[in-house]
Amino acid sequence: MDDEVRAMRQRLFAALRPARTPASGRTAAPSLPPGRLITLPGRGELFVRDHRPADAIDPPVLLLHGWSWSLDVNYFGVMSRFVADRIGFLGYDQRGHGRGLPADRPFEIEDLAADALALLDLLGIGKVIVSGYSLGGPVALHLALSHPDRVAGLVLAATALNYRQTLRDRTVWRVLTATTPLARLGIGSSISARYFGLSRRTSPDLAAMWPWLRGELARTPVSGVFATGRAVSRYDLRHRVAGLRRIPAAVVITTHDTVCHPRTQQQLADQLEARSFELPADHDAPVVRPAEFAAAVTAAIAHVRSPSPK
């Protein structure tokens, strides 16, 4: 059996197990900067963490999280590192996720990029370095394509230019399409939590954080997951990003990724002519290995702030 297929099968089996962990006697939750709910005119309410100390280096970093997660789930390790390093940032729950805008009508990745722009406009922020993980990568690219004057740099991680390039990808979308009717019944609401079924059994730190993590993952409605998945499945920027090469960019490649193939991550780096930073981890690195993920993202941001000549 192919190693990729075996790894994906293990993940799928983990998703079928109960999203519970035996009590370890120790619980933990990350320390995060204050957050608040903001109303975007004409769009709705969303949850934002905005940490821009007066002595932070401009421009701030915009954090865009991955599919089925939330800002806090994806970036708790990064946010803690940024606070300690006095790096200014803001991030929010994207549409259909966590405490984000409702996914009450069909949308495309371009609409998610428009949400990001609307938030920047509301907060009076001119330029940002955009850090996009997984789903956040396509959103960051569309924001840069539509408003390059607002993007000072791109830091993309565990993401690709298209998600239909492998048999594994196409199989995932076929399963998603077939199970979409179940979302209307609320079935599948714990899939995001069950994804961590393998990791939480081998990581004491993750096991201790599990009550907090499970609660955060439960904030994302399954209808939002499916709606976003349909948008992701239609997204394709292959051979459309050459114009972004003038924007400093770095790509963090999760070299053991069983969700976003490392080959497609490298394809993104190649087409952007971006610097690659390898992280020997799976797609759940932000949660299972938060310190290493934060270090990789911080190094990538330092690179785009002071890029070497191409």
Image: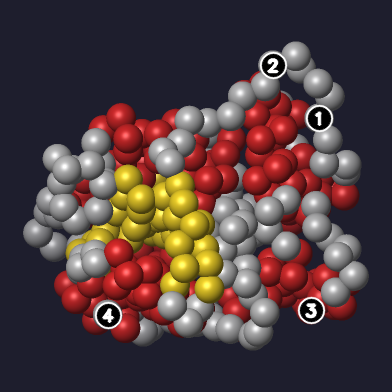
SS class of the residue under badge 4? loop
The location of residue 152, given as percent across then percent down, is 20, 64
Residue 225 placement: quadrant? bottom right
For the C terminus, the quadrant is bottom left
**Spatial CA span between label 4 and label 3:** 32 Å
Residue at mark 4: 147
Residue at mark 3: 177
User: Which residue appears at 74% of the width and 70% of the height?
Assistant: 223
Amino acid type of the residue tagged 2 in the rendering: Arg
Q: Which disc number belongs to residue 21?
A: 1
Dot 2 or dot 3: first in sequence order is 2
Mark 4, other Cα within 10 Å: few <14 / some 14–19 / many ≥20: some
**Spatial CA span between label 4 and label 2:** 46 Å
Amino acid type of the residue tagged 3 in the rendering: Thr
**Spatial CA span between label 2 and label 1:** 12 Å
Amino acid type of the residue tagged 1 in the rendering: Thr
Disc 2 to disc 1: CB gap under 8 Å: no
In front: 7, or 222?
A: 222
Q: Nearer the viewer, mark 4 or mark 3?
A: 4
User: Which residue appears at 32% of the width and 38% of the height?
Assistant: 82
**Spatial CA span between label 2 and label 3:** 40 Å
Asked if residue 124 is positioned above or below residue 156 in the image, the reply reads below
Disc 4 to disc 3: CB gap under 8 Å: no
Residue 242 seen: no
